[in-house]
Amino acid sequence: MLLAKVRTLLAVHFAYMMEYRAEIFFWILGGLVPFFFMAAWSEAARQGYTPYSPLEYARYFFAVFVARQLAIVWANWTFSDWVRTGKLSFYLLQPLDPMWRLLADHVGERGVRFPVLAVIGAVFAALFPGALVWPGWGALALGLAASTLAFLLSFFVAYSVGLLSFWLEDATEIFELWYVLVLFFSGMLAPLSLYPEAVQRVLLWTPFPHLVYLPAALWSGLEPADARGFAVLLVWTLVFFAASRLLWRLGRRRYSAMGA
């Protein structure tokens, strides 16, 4: 019974997202930033300034692109809009926690995103022969597991920020700070192995490098599997999940007290 309900919920949100397939296509194109970094680092490699080859950079930054695409979230903006417009009141009348509605929205969107990613992958393979290689079933599975955890962590962070709209007029800007930290410390700008060792030691206990670098390094063969990375990612995911549930209980009480 529960699986049937989940399947129906995901099917509804997938059909809903299909209506926005053109917009999703342009969202994906807007996420091609890793390829600009790939060009810069590949040029540095050709001049002998880095320990990796241009082909290794191409492989790594394509994996970064995929990891980022699978972890994109917008729960903060959606929930803030629900609170601001009063739409949340309508959802509170339904026997479904708004968090699950938002999560299904994100998962359904991935079904629309996958075919576009496959096309981009085919074009990339044609432009950079030898850049895409089969990582092996183990590395593929571990990378997908890391990417799934990265998505859940990103979702709970964004949802927690959206929940702050119960108290703040506009909480969405807080998520921009999170994105800046992800940009600089997740491996999007460069492989984490190129950072100073002291910086690496500190970052490995934060969620940022595991959001992108962990799955990308596994898929590209840059690094072997790191059990600590999975553990840190899981702990941070549970922390923000707990924070989101606490904020939901407190915020809903405040929302009801305001007469909504």
Image: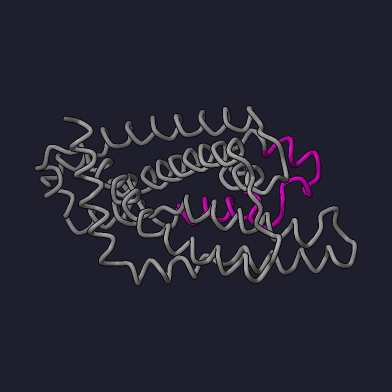
Indicate the position of residue 106 as horizontal and vertical percent values. 34, 51
Residue 19 in view here = yes
Residue segment shown in magenta: 175-203
Q: Residue at image x 27%, y 54%?
A: 14
- Type of secondary structure dominating the magenta stretch: helix
Q: Residue at image x 34%, y 57%?
A: 77
- Towards the viewer: 155 or 70: 70
Residue 185 in view here = no
Indicate the position of residue 56 as horizontal and vertical percent values. 75, 56
Q: Quadrant of the N terminus?
A: top left
Place residue 109 in its image quadrant.
Answer: bottom left
Q: Residue furthest right?
A: 48
Indicate the position of residue 260 as horizontal and vertical percent values. 12, 47
Place residue 226 in its image quadrant.
Answer: top right
Q: Is residue 37 above or below residue 106?
A: below
Q: How many marks on residues?
A: 0
Query: Magenta stretch: residue 98 in it?
Result: no
Place residue 210 in its image quadrant.
Answer: top right
Q: Is residue 219 above or below residue 238?
A: below
Q: Residue at image x 57%, y 31%?
A: 230
| 219 sits to left or right of 171 | right
Q: Is residue 64 above or below residue 205?
A: below
